[in-house]
Amino acid sequence: MDHGDVILRFQNVTFEFVEDHPLLEDATFSVRERAKVTIMGQNGAGKSTIFKMIIGELKPKTGSVTMRPNATVAIAQQVMPSDAMEKTVTEYFAGAFAEKKYDLDKRVREILDVVNLDVPHEKKVRDLSGGQQARLLLAFALIQEPDILLLDEPTNNLDAEGIFHLTYFLQTYEKTVIVISHDTEFLNSFTDGVLHLDVFTQKVNQYVGDYYQVVENIAAQIERDRMKNARLEKEILDRKEKVNFFANKGGKMRKLASKLRDEVDEAEENKVDTLREDKTLRGFTIEPQEWKEEIVNISRVTVVKNHEPLEKEVSIKLRRGQKLLITGPNGVGKSTFLRALASGLNPGAHIASGVRVGYYRQDFSGLDYDQSGYDALASAMDSPDNETIYAVGAHFLLKSQTLKQPIRTYSEGQKGLLCYAQFVLMEPALLIMDEPTNHINFRHIPVIAEALNEFDGALIMVSHVQDFVDKIKFSDELDLGRLTRI
């Protein structure tokens, strides 16, 4: 696709949440009309921060963010706004437009097809499942057909058919798209450029090409920079040894030593900041609370068929070491069941009194965003102590400076890792996991799967990521989709 004029420009942008700890430093790049750009980088490198600066939610400390005059922007939010919950689907989409659209129903039908969602337009948003609301948020951004479309992990909660529909939409979308995602196959299907953020140097590098090609280019650049620095280090060491030798001599030898010192300084200046891949999470263990009795008893569940709730009798009991996988299509009531179970509002599903529960919510709504990461970890312990909190935080790639910051400043990936750090400190008897790979760097997923597989408490999980599910040995499966057919 031919690209037009520049529609978005970052010029010498520096941004920081904490004074003298820049997240981005002197970032300069531009995006052209009709470009399909991926933002990639390590957890906490500033990917979501760039989105927030584009929509004006955050302002740079120095530098400028400019857009083509009258350019429109839409972003797929991660959490449904509370004021949207009482609206019908139609009313919700009406809010996407400044003026009344007389063909709104037609537009809604078409955009819901793009995200593979079939719900009545008169249904209240609050009555949709978590997965359905996630698709609605994505559709809300798409229906606006903005000049700049911002998508943050858009394939979360989408099944294979939903990803196919979205990919086709983006391939044929004739405006600018900027995407954050860890789904490599999805990205490679439409990306023609990459903005690479580096958490270690706070720099942004711009690359042209499809996703796989750019990843190869970055790996090659890392190797070239590593080899260059290794050569310079060797030269520096050699010259320093000669400086030490000649400096103790007189006359011309001392002048030679001075010249060699200058060469050492020049070599030091010529060393480059090498890009570094995100660290992979090291293996960890979630120790369970001691519990000899039954942990969970599920006798009845509510499933959704043709958008109507149905009560179904089941018989599932979980003790230590047992793992339950809950399956079924989007909208059948999986996340709703987990929420009701965790909150004690499901009369047909009972958690034994005194059981400590670790609950991974796909939207991180269980975290207090005004709280610091340190306080969130401390709240998971009976007797908090600094050494343990900072050690566990570091294990989950959350540095001490990060732990001091409010959770609202964290990337989505860092919020996910914070949840796992909480579980380690909490020592729960029961883990309730709702899409536990959402926003997690793909490098960490096998490590998390191993930890959950080895977890010796009770585990209840919902996940659409089959490769992840296959790595965990489940003792039972509750297929809510099958219950709607009997």
Image: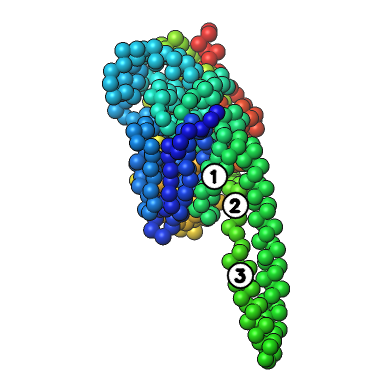
Three-letter amino acid code of the residue under disc 3: Glu
State the image coordinates of residue 35 (x, y, percent, origin top left). Answer: 51, 33
Q: Residue at x 65, y 44 (%)?
A: 217
Counting residues from the start of the chain, the first of labels 1 and 3 encountered is 1
In this rendering, is residue 395 above or below 72? below
- Name the amino acid type tagged 1: Gln
The residue singled out by tag 3 in the image is 266
Q: Are marks 2 and 3 in contact (CB under 8 Å)?
A: no
Q: Quick check: 102 left or right of 362?
A: left
Residue 437 falls in which quadrant of the image? top right
Q: Residue 111: x and y, percent?
A: 44, 18
Near mark 1 (Cα within 10 A), the count class, few <14, some 14-19 or many ≥20, is some
Q: Residue 108 got which mark?
A: none
N-term-proximal mark, 1 vs 2? 1
Q: Which residue is mark 1?
A: 206
Residue 41 vs 343, above or below: the answer is below
Question: Does label 2 or label 3 sit earlier along the sequence?
Answer: 3
The amino acid pointed to by label 2 is Leu
Q: Secondary structure at mark 1?
A: strand
Nearer the observer, 67 or 464: 67
Q: Helix, strand or loop at disc 3?
A: helix
Q: CA distance from mark 2 to mark 3?
A: 21 Å
Residue at 28% over, 21% down: 99
> Residue at the location (60% across, 32% down)?
188
Which image quarter holds the N terminus?
Answer: top right
Query: Residue at the spot x=60%, y=59% of the render?
Result: 272
Comparing 285 with 120, the one in front is 120
The residue pinned by badge 2 equals 275
Pointer 2: residues within 10 angstroms few (<14), some, or many (20+)? many
